[in-house]
Image (cartoon, grey):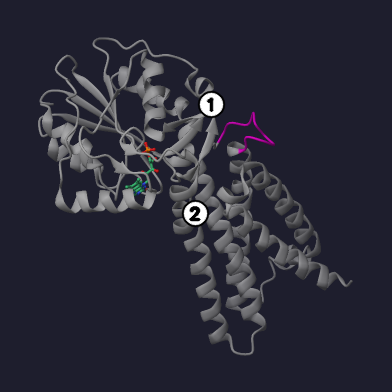
Amino acid sequence: MTKKKIGTIGDILMYALLLAQMLYIFIGNNVHEILGIAFFVCLTGHIILKGWWFKTLFKKEKTSLRRFFDAITCLLMLTIIVLMLSSMGVSRFIFPNVRFMGSAALHRYLATAVLTLGVLHGGLHFIMRAKKPARAWIIVIALCAAAFSIGIFAVPYLNRHFRSVDIVRSEKLNGDRVNWSGTKPMVVYFTRLGNTDFEPDVDAVSGASLLTSDGGLTGSNELLADMAGSILSCEPVAITLTGKKYPSSYNATIAVAGDELRAQARPAIEQVDVTGTDSIILIYPLWWGSIPMPVATFLEQNDFTGKTIYLIASQGSSGYGRTVSEVESLCPGASVIPGTSIYCEDIPDARPVLYDLIKKWNSGQ
Ligand SMILES: Cc1cc2nc3c(=O)[nH]c(=O)nc-3n(C[C@H](O)[C@H](O)[C@H](O)COP(=O)(O)O)c2cc1C
């Protein structure tokens, strides 16, 4: 086989590996990590085969297209190096003890950048050789847009709808505590789990909010609340519907939540008494970029004048959405302090983040 053929097969393999890794939730963590190593092996081969490119990098007489290609290639290499570092940070199988850059959200953004720049890098090769460059540009731009959309939209969508994670609950709750000075904040949370009419066959249930924990089910925000509770040594309080619960199907819940949001419904909940505290840590999932309507009920049912509301959101890609201003307008007399918005994949390992936050809040920062 010629060097060129080996190079082409290697290149196709690298794109296939990157794409397969994007389907993380179907292949599972360990396969994802092994494929990651395979990608970096192929990349090393690619760099060795294309080593001549480095020698041409500082040549002066180049077309502007070639200069653009070189700039994209340099940017791609830089992004791959940062991706490599973040891969180790999020690794639980091959590098379980490396803990820097351990954000799944950051890892996904970097992987999206590498896939998009990788497609552009290969596409520019294609354009430089194309007989009809205009048509080649259209194809390459379309492929880059597709690569970008996979990382930014498709992966979070799959995560939200199909991901379920096994955790050992006691391990996730174990760690340092904060000795809060003054009256401890009350930890109040809302989660889909506990407010859903699950079918008896729990395996039939899909949706990112379900973390399979020691054989049971845990809502993502319930886990976050328990982490905050374990840091503050207090018992979190759930916002619980008293009327009709959400349907077992994830998609049906999304539809119901959308209807509730449009109608600005206020579903009935069990009374949560906040009179005995002057601060609340409110933990909630983003629903349609908004607070779930039962959380709005909780905020309207209580008087938060003079109190501090610390916000911890969880989400499948949208940060805080509109939730900070929503809480502010529902609780005009309160001081609303956003803490963090946690990407759903980062929830199982969020305790150190919450610890740092609560420590900071306790010191008055
Ligand atoms: C009805 C519904 C709507 C959602 N809307 C959004 C959204 O607009 N943006 C987002 O990033 N995530 C969205 N998500 C994902 C959840 O915020 C995320 O999976 C959260 O961690 C689930 O928490 P839970 O298990 O405690 O319910 C939505 C989930 C549901 C069920």
SS for callout 2: helix
**Residue 181, how many percent across, how many down?**
29, 10
Q: Which stretch did the figure color magenta?
A: 91-100
Residue 14 relative to residue 19: left or right: right
Rendered residue at 58%/60% (across/down): 115
Residue placed farthest to the right in the image?
Answer: 1
Determine whether 153 is above or below 357 in the image.
below
Is residue 101 positioned above or below 112 on the image?
Answer: above
The three-letter amino acid code for the residue at tag 2 is: Val
Viewed as shown, does residue 261 lie left or right of 197? left
Residue at screen point 19% across, 23% down = 272
Three-letter amino acid code at the position of disc 1 = Asp
Of circles 2 and 1, which is in front?
Answer: 1
Residue sitting at x 53%, y 56%: 112
Chief secondary structure of the magenta span? loop
Q: Which mark is residue 214?
A: 1
**Is 298 in front, or is 317?**
298
Residue 306 among magenta residues: no
Up-down relation of residue 239 to residue 78 (above or below): above
Residue most extreme to the bottom: 131
